[in-house]
């Protein structure tokens, strides 16, 4: 087909949500990407795929375009906006191996498939996800992959959305007890005698590269955030599995410690005195209903949140926990109201699925855009990866975009066009002021805070190491998240950029980990986790840019931003909903698909389909994502009570 209602260029999270919403509302959707993997800067890679991505972004080769035959398709009353062929969103890529790299020569990735031929598109040599996961088949992936190891305190959860949300647990008879009791489960582990794990080598990482799903962007899902609500509302949650973030950590006075968050955590904490427990609970209770007590904070509205905390009779350790690990706001820039809002959001998310506010998708954040792409495909969306677009065709009189011309020279018409920011040419982005995100990804051999259980998903906020430096968000993932091989941890570091990623983050890496440098003493190396491999890079933050900043943008062309530096995904969801409502104001945004029992079939259609769906002995129904869930993951699903 050469005519569509909506053409979407780029498969990042905002574009994928918008494409799914359009297809669900009955629009004809074409979704293309010049890369050979889903997600763009939201993608997840196997280890070999990430190495190819690193090589591509370090070389930054120009893509030649000698053929001009496509210009014959442009009429006299039309002009073109040539799209960028070179992705400039990633800079300063530096990777380091802290193990014997020579030992990996000749080692091949187990189960690797032949590489696809390069069409000259901007795409990594190694496919980001395995081919069977391009249109995300979570059901098949769960069966084929090694079952995650069970982590204490992480239980299967069902979310029932009716008049109110219920939280039921396999081990709980009372839904209301889930929030407090889940914290107690954290410490209950069955300790079985096990051999000391062998030292992990770089050659093992290469060989087990398909065990890794390494995200370009590091985020968590707030349990009551916009993305979780959208996943439930649209029923897209059935395509994915999630794991609870099990620990909130703090870095104070050179050491890492666990932060008590829920009521049960606070009262079971051994690091807080009885007086501190009462102080903390009193302040957290106030934060939950701070709007009702404006007299307690209105005198400090123009002060920073850190200054406000000092007036609340809190000990220095409690102030540190609240500022950096609960509110997670800047010590110097965040106002009192911003801090109170962030603390309230954190507390409201506690207890919905576990004793922390956060969920993490199995196989990485890159699964989420693919889930929405799958929803779009289910409702008739057409997908083309490795499919660059040469230009937008604009009508000179109306100023509206009429069509695109792809790299095959095919002209495709549509009413609306959605373009990811990185595809826009410099001529349109002259007045746009971009920010940058500093990122680091580490593969380590042990956790930053060892406990009885190795299978922990931890989030740690590290305060600025020097004046003028930003706080750094650290997310540590274990092997049961299906993002790294056994006996390793995947560590993501993120902060707003002030310099190159390495300059921003290396000091934090050196504080938390051992790099096998001569300066470190032997005792320090034994205490700290060892970094086996690391990569640093800067990523463009194109969020929050006003539409008027783009020069000469046609009125029916909408721009989606890349990832922002925030921990959650609210920005992407808001952007997708705003774009959709602007295009189709009378349509519902991502409603749930109809139940199979409610669909009325035409008699002729039923007769035609009967042979295809006959119950022959050879045909076996595939298990659903919920049936294939592993015991320690969180399945988020919606049941209609209509």
Image (spheres, grey):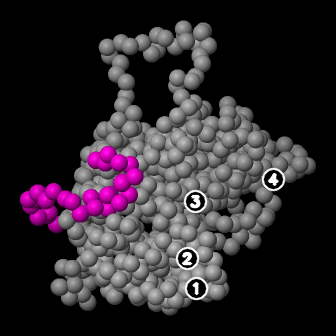
Instruction: Give how far across and how far down residue 547 sits, in percent.
Output: 75, 62
Residue bearing mark 4: 555
Residue holding disc 1:
304
**Mark toward the start of the polypeptide (1 vs 4):** 1
Question: How far separated are the C-alphas under marks 4 and 3?
Answer: 25 Å
Residue at the farthest right position: 397
Which quadrant of the structure image shows residue 459?
bottom left
On screen, 170 above or below 1?
A: below
Give the CA distance from mark 3 to mark 1. Answer: 24 Å
Task: Look at 18% across and 79% down and name the residue there.
Answer: 526
- Name the secondary structure under disc 3: helix
Q: Which residue is mark 2?
A: 339
Q: Nearer the viewer, residue 601 or 98?
A: 601
3 or 2: tag closer to the N-terminus: 2
Q: Do the residues bearing badges 3 and 1 touch, measured as CB atoms within 8 Å?
A: no
Pointers 2 and 1 in contact (C-beta within 8 Å): yes
Q: Nearer the viewer, mark 3 or mark 2?
A: 2
- Which of discs 3 and 1 lies nearer the camera? The answer is 1
Q: Main secondary structure of the magenta part?
A: loop
Q: Position of residue 257 (x, y in %)?
A: 31, 77
Q: Residues within 10 Å of mark 2 (few under 14, many from 20)?
A: many
Can residue 317 be seen here? yes
Q: Is residue 362 left or right of residue 377?
A: left
Q: CA distance from mark 1 to mark 4?
A: 41 Å
| Count of residue discs | 4
Magenta residue span? 171-199
Q: Position of residue 142 (x, y in %)?
A: 33, 41
N-term-proximal mark, 3 vs 1:
1
Residue 570: which numbered mark, if any? 3
């Amino acid at each position: 087909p050469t005519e569509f209602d909506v053409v979407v260029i780029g498969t990042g999270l905002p574009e994928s949500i918008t494409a799914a919403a359009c297809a669900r509302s009955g629009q004809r959707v074409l979704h293309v990407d010049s890369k050979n993997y889903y997600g763009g800067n939201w993608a997840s890679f196997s280890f070999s795929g990430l190495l190819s991505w690193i090589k591509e972004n370090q070389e930054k080769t120009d893509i030649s375009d000698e053929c001009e035959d496509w210009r014959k398709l442009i009429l006299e009353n039309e002009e073109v906006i040539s799209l960028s062929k070179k992705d400039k969103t990633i800079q300063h890529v530096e990777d380091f191996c802290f193990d014997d790299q020579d030992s990996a020569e000749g080692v091949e990735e187990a189960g690797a498939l032949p590489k696809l031929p390069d069409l000259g598109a901007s795409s990594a040599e190694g496919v980001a996800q395995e081919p069977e996961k391009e249109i995300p088949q979570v059901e098949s992936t769960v069966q084929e992959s090694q079952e995650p190891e069970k982590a204490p305190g992480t239980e299967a959860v069902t979310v029932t959305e009716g008049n109110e949300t219920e939280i039921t647990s396999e081990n709980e008879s009372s839904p209301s007890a889930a929030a407090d009791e889940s914290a107690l489960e954290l410490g209950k582990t069955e300790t079985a005698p096990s051999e000391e794990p062998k030292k992990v080598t770089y050659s093992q990482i290469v060989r087990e590269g398909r065990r890794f799903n390494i995200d370009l962007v590091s985020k968590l899902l707030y349990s009551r955030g916009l993305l979780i609500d959208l996943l439930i509302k649209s029923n897209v949650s059935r395509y994915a599995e999630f794991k609870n973030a099990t620990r909130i950590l703090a870095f104070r006075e050179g050491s890492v410690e666990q932060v008590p968050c829920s009521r049960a955590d606070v009262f079971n904490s051994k690091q807080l005195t009885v007086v501190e427990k009462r102080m903390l609970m009193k302040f957290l209770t106030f934060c939950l209903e701070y709007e009702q007590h404006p007299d307690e904070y209105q005198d400090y509205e123009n002060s920073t949140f850190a200054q406000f905390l000092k007036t609340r009779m809190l000990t220095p350790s409690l102030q540190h926990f609240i500022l950096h690990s609960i509110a997670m706001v800047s010590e110097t820039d965040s106002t009192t109201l911003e801090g109170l809002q962030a603390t309230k959001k954190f507390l409201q998310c506690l207890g919905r699925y576990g004793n922390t506010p956060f969920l993490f998708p199995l196989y990485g954040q890159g699964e989420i855009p693919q889930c929405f792409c799958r929803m779009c495909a289910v409702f008739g969306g057409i997908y083309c990866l490795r499919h660059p677009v040469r230009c937008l065709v604009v009508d000179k009189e109306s100023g509206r975009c009429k069509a695109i011309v792809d790299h095959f020279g095919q002209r495709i018409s549509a009413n609306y066009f959605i373009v990811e920011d990185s595809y826009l040419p410099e001529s349109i982005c002259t007045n746009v002021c971009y920010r940058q995100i500093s990122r680091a990804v580490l593969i380590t051999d042990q956790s930053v805070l060892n406990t009885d259980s190795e299978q922990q998903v931890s989030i740690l906020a590290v305060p600025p190491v020097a004046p003028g430096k930003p706080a750094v968000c650290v997310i540590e993932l274990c092997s049961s998240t299906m993002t790294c091989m056994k006996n390793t941890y995947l560590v993501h570091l993120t902060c707003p950029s002030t310099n190159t990623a390495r300059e921003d983050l290396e000091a934090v890496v050196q504080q938390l980990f051992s790099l096998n440098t001569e300066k470190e003493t032997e005792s320090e190396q034994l205490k700290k986790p060892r970094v086996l491999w690391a990569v640093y890079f800067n990523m463009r933050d194109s969020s929050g840019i006003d539409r008027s900043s783009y020069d000469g943008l046609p009125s029916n062309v909408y721009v989606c931003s890349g990832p922002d530096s925030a921990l959650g995904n609210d920005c992407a969801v808001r952007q997708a909903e705003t774009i959709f409502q602007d295009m189709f104001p009378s349509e519902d945004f991502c409603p749930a698909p109809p139940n199979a029992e409610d669909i009325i079939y035409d008699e002729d259609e039923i007769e035609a389909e009967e042979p295809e769906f006959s119950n022959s002995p050879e045909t076996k129904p595939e298990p659903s994502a919920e049936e294939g869930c592993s015991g320690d993951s969180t399945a988020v699903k919606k049941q209609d009570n209509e």
